[in-house]
Image (cartoon, grey):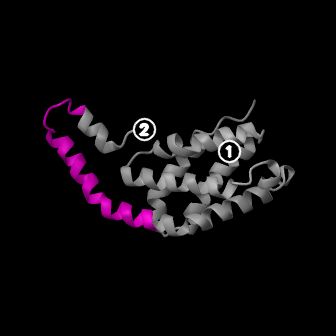
């Protein structure tokens, strides 16, 4: 878990930044207004995204019943935390931030509740798909790769 900017500075190894590293820092700095705009859009849509994901997930997996009956009454709040962590990852340009700060914990919660692998994977896929639908295109373009990354690290389905 390390932002691109931190990695660039660390690679300088206590030296001044070379021209390519300077360019990376400036490119990141220029991207900040769009990143903040996206983060504000995510903040406004966070509750809607979480509630839509939870509703669709429960409908897709009726065998599990409502999340609260499954022993997961804080499901919507947990999903909001994952969305928020992904937005912070966008701000920092750190694609691993959401996994390290929120999704890993959510994944362990689902394992503890004996949620089947496929249902767990579906939840993360729904997060990305719902964000794509709920956010303005520019915000979705920045956020969705962070959420898609969570889908990619979901535990594999049993063979």
Residue drawn 51% across the image and 43% down it: 101
- Residue 157 image offset from top left, x and y in percent: 72, 35
Check disc 1 and report the residue beneath it. 121
Q: In the rendered view, would you say 38 is above or below 96? A: below
**Is the residue marked by circle 1 packed among few (<14), some (14-19), or many (20+) residues within 10 Å?**
many
Residue nearest the observer in this picture, 115 or 128 = 115
**Residue found 51% across the figure and 69% down from its top:** 44
Relative height, residue 134 to residue 6 (above, below): below
User: In the picture, which quadrant includes the N terminus?
Assistant: top left
Dominant secondary structure (helix, strand or loop) of the stretch shown in magenta: helix
Instruction: Give the CA distance from mark 2 to mark 1.
Output: 22 Å
Of the residues under marks 2 and 1, which one precedes in the sequence? 2
Q: Which mark is residue 1?
A: 2
Q: Is residue 112 above or below residue 123?
A: above
- Measuring 81% from the left and 49% from the top, which residue is drawn there? 70
Residue 143 on the magenta segment: no
Estimate the x, y position of residue 83 in percent, counting from the top left: 54, 56
Q: Residue furthest right?
A: 63
Of tags 2 and 1, the one toward the viewer is: 2
Q: Secondary structure at mark 1?
A: helix
Q: At numbered mark 2, what does the secondary structure look like: helix, strand or loop?
A: loop
What residue appears at the point 58 percent right and 44 percent down from the top-left corner? 103
Residue stretch rendered in magenta on the structure: 11-40
């Amino acid at each position: 878990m390390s932002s691109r900017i931190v990695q660039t500075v660390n690679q300088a190894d206590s030296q001044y930044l070379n021209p390519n590293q300077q360019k990376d820092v400036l490119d990141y700095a220029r991207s900040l207004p769009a990143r903040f705009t996206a983060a504000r859009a995510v903040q406004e849509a966070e509750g809607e995204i979480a509630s839509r994901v939870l509703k669709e997930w429960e409908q897709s997996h009726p065998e599990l019943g409502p999340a609260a009956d499954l022993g997961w009454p804080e499901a919507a709040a947990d999903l909001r935390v994952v969305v928020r962590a992904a937005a912070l990852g966008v701000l920092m340009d750190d694609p691993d931030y959401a996994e390290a700060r929120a999704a890993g914990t959510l994944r362990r919660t689902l394992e503890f509740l004996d949620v089947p692998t496929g249902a767990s994977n579906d939840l993360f896929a729904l997060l990305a798909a719902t964000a794509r639908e709920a956010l303005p295109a520019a915000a979705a373009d920045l956020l969705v790769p962070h959420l898609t990354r969570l889908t990619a690290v979901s535990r594999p389905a049993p063979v």
